[in-house]
Amino acid sequence: MPKASELKRGMVIEINGIPHAVKQLEAKSPSSRGASTLYKVRFTNLLSKQKLDESYKGDDMLREADCVRVPIQFSYQDGDNTVFMNSEDYSQYEVSANELEGQLGYITDATEGMIALLMDGKLLSIELPQSINMEITETPPAIKGASASARTKPATLTTGLEVQVPEYLEQGEIIKINTTTGKFMSRA
């Protein structure tokens, strides 16, 4: 049973017997002395797809949903649906693109380390790896003499995802992206 302070994006928590996935997590530290940190969490009900906002203290205990975690890989795109294959028994799971909200930009044929959360043989959600490597397909030219300062420019990646990268990077370079924040981490 995880504490509220141990929650991570993508975890599945059971609330009133229904599995909910953690979509957003925000820690709020009150200014008064002795007050505990509050965690504002936005869940998505994995059955009805409704959003639920809750607040917890750091030491509140939550119940993790009884899900089976299996390694998967991207198979193919079929219209509005995305098909994934179980890496162990090669069974396939189909999920609509709007259920993957915000995750589709990180998924390619080469994405490794994805985990499917299954309950009663049905795909509930997908956990992405902490970071992925992608190629820059389009970005303004590198600026001569640019240092590793905080100045950035937009870059489009192979999936169409747009991120801010340092000025010295060029088209064709492989970079590492944090899938939780969607931010540039380093060259790969």
Image (cartoon, rainbow, N blue to C red):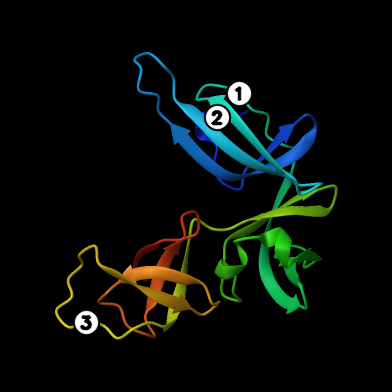
**Residues at marks 1 and 2 touching, judged by CB atoms closer than 8 Å:** yes
Determine which quarter of the picture holds residue 30.
top left
Picture residue at 68% right of the left edge, 63% below the top: 72
Q: How many marks?
A: 3
Q: Which residue is mark 1?
A: 61
Picture residue at 44% right of the left edge, 25% below the top: 37
Q: Name the element at disc 2.
A: helix
**Separation of marks 1 and 2 at Cα, in angstroms:** 6 Å
Residue extending furthest front?
31
**Separation of marks 1 and 3 at Cα, in angstroms:** 50 Å
* Nearer to us in this view, 50 or 92: 50
Tell me the amino acid under the disc marked 3. Ile
Q: Name the element at disc 1.
A: loop
Q: Position of residue 14 (x, y in %)?
A: 73, 34
Q: Earlier in the sequence, mark 1 or mark 3?
A: 1
Q: Which residue is mark 2?
A: 4
